[in-house]
Image (tube, coloured by chain):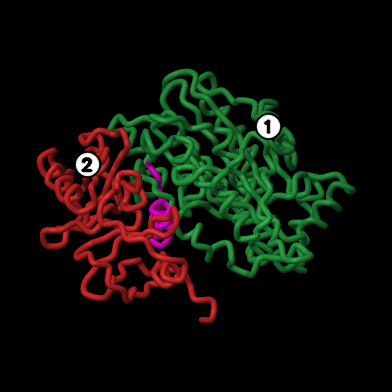
Chain colours: A green, B red
Amino acid sequence: MKKKNNLELKPLFEERMKKLLEPADYGRYKKILSKPILRSIRCNTLKISPDELKKILEKKNWKISQPWKNYPEVMVVEGKNSEEDLIELEPGELGRALEHILGYYYIQELASMLPIIVLKPKPDDKFLDLCASPGSKTTQACSEMKNSGTIIANEINLGRIKILASNLERCGVTNSIITMSDGVLLCDRLKEQGIFFDKILVDAPCSGEGTLRSSPKTYFMWNVKTIKGVSKLQKKLFEKAFEVLRVDGEMIYSTCTHAPEEDEEIVDFALEKFKDKIKIEKIILPIKCREGITEWEGKKFSKETKNSCRIYPHDSDTEGFFISKFRKVKAG
Amino acid sequence: MQQIIFLSAREKQEIIEKLKNQFGIENVDGEFVLSGTDRIFLYQGNLKQDEITRIQKRTVIERIGIYFAKKINDEIKLSLDGVQISKDKICKNIFEINKTQANDWMMGKEILIETGLRGFIILKYENNFLGCGKASEGKITNFVPKSRRLKDKRN
């Protein structure tokens, strides 16, 4: 298990979370923040089957569980079997292992695997991953697509592109094109060129409230001004991405934050903006999902935002996440 | 990525011939894309060349497909991932190593051994294909990129 953290939440953050959660629920939420996250990995089925990988890892005395029955590629490394006890992996051991270097698995938090599980990309799809780095969901999509079809993996930042490229390479992804562009601009240009997609993932840049368990810097960096600012960008990304979705195509909008301004407010904006061209779909997940909220700080959202999915860390021992799924039902 | 140049069917076939001679690889699905003068990328996606060209007119394409191989003089050096992608097709110039050698190899060390082979060879440990090395008298030169090496825990 990773080291526990004992960081303090900012008062305004606490106040906002208390508006989202009932008192007892909030207590459970706060308690789990100091619990280390599970060491989860995803088998890269482009290179190895879950059964084979499990055998190899168990030969190293790692104790492996597969928490989601229908998704054997999802694994949790619970520790190392020693003579009597289960002991913790050494720091960095997951990333240092030969099997990781050869791309047999990807270290990925459980909740972060959900957007692709919901989107279900298929071989031969044209897929746009608008904010792709570091590539966890891109590589997951490529596995689902069996390296056929095409993924355009976009990232605006050169440093992050290098990480993305290195992860795609390690995982043996051969059907991707990495573009370096502002996401809004990229969609405009793709539209001009008449290039449309079957599936789109907008895993939007966000305030990261859901990542407190794995990324303690969020405790210090959290700021309500960031939320308001990033919300505008998220609306723009959604709007432009939806314009390059083909009719009957599907799009996921996800964030790793609980802030309604970045979640349901974006969904509400999209439903209002695209009216009869868009349909929000129900989501079925392998973990607990709470429906989206319909009101926040006096602002009412469309009732359909309930079809979105809020994932809280204390519900299924994951990070926090938000997922919504849309279908384009009419051109325009 | 520099200008994207898709190799023609004839140019691709020339590379395949070399891969066949060196490693027994008889075919590779997908397009070969040249970056610079000698690096070959493999793209197995379904966007047509003209669609990619159209995208590139207005957007920076940083990379297409995977770094597959490098032309060196008249030979082809497969990348670590090129070896992994082709592992089911490689049937020539495979050299099997033991656990200690595999560990050293993945740490970027050359292996001091007489293989009886010369030129580019494929290193294999159990079912793992560990990339391409160059066999010469008494040693195998290592090409595992720094970013993909095992770290020595003592450092």
Quarter holding residue A113? top right
Q: Is residue A236 visible?
A: no
- The part of the image, by quadrant, that contains residue A245 is top left
Q: How many marks?
A: 2
Q: State the residue position of label 1.
A: A301
Residue B50 place in picture, x, y as percent: 20, 34
Q: Residue A250: which numbered mark, if any? A: none
Q: Residue at x 21, y 36 (%)?
A: B49
Question: In terms of secondary structure, what is the magenta stretch mainly?
Answer: helix
Q: Nearer the viewer, residue A192 or A27?
A: A27
Depicted B58 relative to depicted A274: above or below:
below
Is disc 2 in contact with disc 1, using a CB cutoff of under 8 Å?
Answer: no
In the image, which residues are magenta? Answer: A152-170
Separation of residues labelled 2 and 1 (CA atoms): 59 Å
Disc number lying in front (2 or 1): 2
B112 or A226, which is in the foreground?
A: B112
In the depicted view, which residue is nearer to us: A64 or B62?
A: A64
Q: Amino acid at mark 1?
A: Phe
Q: Which residue is mark 2?
A: B26
**Neighbours of disc 1 within 10 Å: few (<14), some (14-19), many (20+):** many
Quadrant assignment, res A225: bottom right
Badge 1: chain ID = A
Say what secondary structure mark 1 lies in: loop
Residue at position x 26%, y 50% from top?
Answer: B41
A195 versus A153 height, above or below:
above
The residue located at (72%, 61%) in the rendering is A36
